[in-house]
Image (cartoon, rainbow, N blue to C red):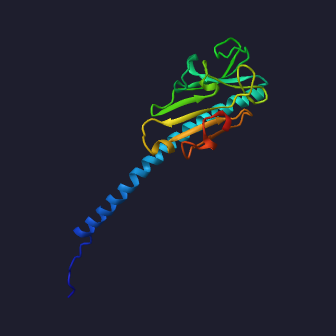
Amino acid sequence: MKNNIIRIKGFTLIELMVTMALLAILMAVAVPSMTTFQRNAQLTSFSNTMLASINAARGEAMKRGRSARMVPTGGGTDWNNGWVIFVDVARTGDYTSPGNITIASREAKPSYLTITGFGTPAETPPYILFDASGYSKTNSGGFGASSFEIKRNDVTGTEQLSQTRRVKIASTGRVRVCTPVSTTDALCSVAASSL
């Protein structure tokens, strides 16, 4: 006669406790890394949006054979409120002037980011100007190297530098994004001479 013993399979209390301890350790390691990854992704995404906008202004200037500009939204002086890209047909520097062709606009940036302009983006009124050849220019007609610094305002200390991006516009019109590796990083500074 066969023994009808039913064996119940499952976890012992010790196995369950070891599994929970390992899960807790993995979560302690993964959550901070995920937060850093998310912050980097948000900052990189916004920086690339600004890069694409500046390149769109340059591309329209060359395509249409006319000057194109990028200015803060609403004719203001704050890039944090968004921007407008337009072909400056009327040569007024104002995107609302009759005859000017609006190409694109961007709404206000997320609240956890701060944008600061250097060069022509810091003038009053601030702007980025490309001529018909795609060169970055100033209102007076000279070449105009400039830059933007985009940084998270919800981090402090050593994280601040790694959560900063700089969008640099050379006088030739070339635009690039860089991450400073130190506060004195010459290759990724905001100074116009290092563009």
Percent x, y for residue 110?
A: 48, 32
The C terminus lies in quadrant: top right
The N terminus lies in quadrant: bottom left
75 vs 34, left or right, is right
**Quarter residue 118 falls in:** top right
**Quarter residue 14 falls in:** bottom left
**Quarter residue 84 falls in:** top right
* Outermost front residue: 184
Whether residue 136 is visible, yes or no, is yes
Name above or below for residue 185 compared with residue 78: below
Of 1 and 57, the residue lying toward us: 57
* Outermost top residue: 98
Name above or below for residue 35 compared with residue 5: above
169 vs 29, left or right, is right
172 vs 151, left or right, is right
Name above or below for residue 131 compared with residue 30: above
Of 86 and 167, the residue lying toward us: 167
Percent x, y for residue 115?
A: 53, 31
Residue sitting at 50 percent across and 31 percent down? 114
Residue sitting at 62 percent across and 40 percent down? 177
Residue sitting at 68 percent across and 33 percent down? 55
Percent x, y for residue 106?
A: 57, 27
Percent x, y for residue 187?
A: 64, 43
Name above or below for residue 32 compared with residue 49: below
Whether residue 104 is visible, yes or no, is no
